[in-house]
Image (cartoon, rainbow, N blue to C red):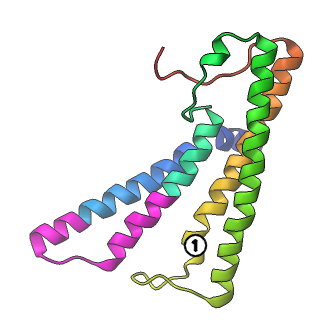
Amino acid sequence: MSDIFKAMDRNGERWLLLVFYVMLVGTMFIEVVRREVFAYSSIWGEEMVRYSFIYLAWIGAAAAVKERGHIRIDVIMNYVPRTVKALLYILGDIVMFAVAAVALYWSWEAVHISWKFGSVTHGLRVSQVFFLFAVPFGFALVMLRLTQSFLRDISDLRSGRPVYEGDKLFD
């Protein structure tokens, strides 16, 4: 069972991103063909693309936290000692966790209200809860990855290893 959890930890966001990306591109392709060839389009296609993109964005945010891939200005990190660098990353994770916790609370409130009043989407006519859930789901994933990052940084700091900085896009 632990192998399954390790695989999910290693590739969970990648698989979810792949599913939503294929759904987005496939639906968009079908809708373009329907519109250009058959002069017909549907409301559900636009909604599927929109909601797939929303899930992509929030799951992608969690994947970026895991890989420390968010855009940041880290010039100062080149000039500080290893310990200070680790402490700065830990401080950043704590601040981001606090922001994510507040955002999770308020985004869950929107899901709760939608559930309470039974709102549905215009085209698909399904409960809007499934689509509003993308935001708290994304923030919960971000908080999970921040916790993992925080624990990894503490471990690196205690053992004297250099802190994980993620892959660099430009060097």
Give the quadrant of residue 75: top right
Up-down relation of residue 4 to residue 46 (above or below): above
Check disc 1 and report the residue beneath it: 130
Most foreground residue, 36 or 9? 36
| Residue range highlighted in magenta | 31-54
Most foreground residue, 11 or 59? 59
- Considering the image in quadrants, where does the N terminus appear? top right
Q: Residue furthest bottom?
A: 117
Amino acid marked by disc 1: Phe
Q: Residues within 10 Å of mark 1 (few under 14, many from 20)?
A: some
Total marks in image: 1
Q: Position of residue 79 (x, y in %)?
A: 67, 10
Residue in view at x 54 percent, y 46 percent: 60
Q: Position of residue 41 (x, y in %)?
A: 22, 76
Residue 165 appears anywhere in the view: yes
Q: Is residue 121 left or right of residue 123?
A: right
Residue in view at x 54 percent, y 70 percent: 131
State whether the magenta stretch is mostly helix, strand or loop: helix
Residue in view at x 70 percent, y 59 percent: 103
Residue 11 appears anywhere in the view: no
Most foreground residue, 80 or 169? 80
Q: Is residue 34 magenta?
A: yes
Q: Position of residue 54 (x, y in %)?
A: 49, 60
